[in-house]
Structures are given as C-alpha cells and as structure tokens.
Amino acid sequence: MSETARLKSTVYVGGLDQAVTTQTLAEAFVPFGEVVDITLPKPDAPSSTDLHRGFGYVEFDLPQDATEAIDNMDGSELFGRTIKVAAAKPQKDSNEGLGSKTAIWEQEGYLAKHAVSEEDKLATEQAEEESNERPQDPMQGLEQLDVAGPKPE
C-alpha cells in the first residue's frame, strides 16, 4: 500500500485515558471495518510512568472505513473521556521547520518556497538602473497647486 493511501486509511485518536490499550482501541474501532494496525506512541521521557502519550493512530484496511470511524467516533466517550477522532496528518520531518536544529534559510523547503529566480533579479536590477539614469524632478505633478480656492471654470 502506498504511503498516501495508507495515510488516508489512518485516523488520529486523541484525548485517551492512560487505561486505554491497543486492545481497547481495536474493540472500539472494529465495527467500522478491518483494523490493520494500532499505534500508541510512548512518552519521550523513559522515566515517565505513563503508558502512552494520550493519543494513538488506528489504521484501517479501506479509506472508507476510516471516514466512517471519524464520522461516528469523533466526540464520543471512551473510559470517561471525550475523544477526538480525525484524519491522520503526515509526520513532519524533524529537520524541517521551526523546530529544527538547522537554520531556516539553510533548509531545502525554505529555499524552494522563497527563492528568487535569476530572471526576477535581472528585472529588478534593470528597473533600478533606469530609475537612476533619468533625473527626478521634485516639482513634477505639483502644477496648479499654488492657486488656492475652487478651480475657475
């Protein structure tokens, strides 16, 4: 299965109680279709007593099953807590964006989005040269401003 098709078949489940396990999620989401995989990310700190980070991902066999699960389970209650169920988003690369340890202007995505083409640079230089060649008249456009009052007809 391609990565995009897999992503369309995966739902994010947030607001989970610590008592929720992969078995619990499987039982809660199996009515909507065949569950292929369930992931409950572990906490970053190894000394933490939490079993998971309070959210998880449920992957279905078909994208329609994921849509059905979102429509029916978002806002429902599981272990006394209201859960959020939404379409999963792709994981961000840790080397891209503001959380990266690399300067933003050195990242490939930034350059692709904000780079200026050579053609635009040349056009800007030509426009600056043309404006420097002709003298600017500070009085240009100020004709007839020395007369006060209504315009004579």
Image (tube, grey):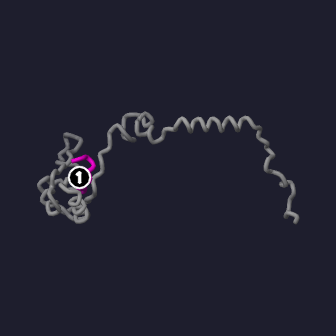
From the top left corner, tell me how far across and down residue 66 is, in percent: 22, 58
Q: Secondary structure at mark 1?
A: strand
In this rendering, the count of numbered labels is 1
Report which quarter residue 119 is drawn in: top right
Determine the residue positioned at 18% across, 62% down.
78
Q: Is residue 7 magenta?
A: yes
**Above or below 128: residue 76:** below
Left or right: residue 115 compared with residue 126 = left
Q: Is residue 21 magenta?
A: no
- The range drawn in magenta is 1-15
Q: Quadrant of the C terminus?
A: bottom right
**Above or below 135: residue 29:** below
Determine the residue positioned at 18% across, 55% down.
61
From the top left corner, tell me how far across and down residue 59 is, in percent: 19, 53
Left or right: residue 74 compared with residue 134 = left
From the top left corner, tell me how far across and down residue 64 is, in percent: 23, 60
Determine the residue positioned at 19% across, 49% down.
40
Amino acid bearing label 1: Phe
Q: Residues within 10 Å of mark 1 (few under 14, many from 20)?
A: many
Q: Which residue is mark 1?
A: 55
Return the residue nearer the eye: 17 or 151: 151
From the top left corner, tell me how far across and down residue 91 is, in percent: 29, 45
Left or right: residue 61 compared with residue 115 = left
Report which quarter residue 113 is drawn in: top left
Report which quarter residue 29 is drawn in: bottom left
Return the residue nearer the eye: 10 or 118: 118
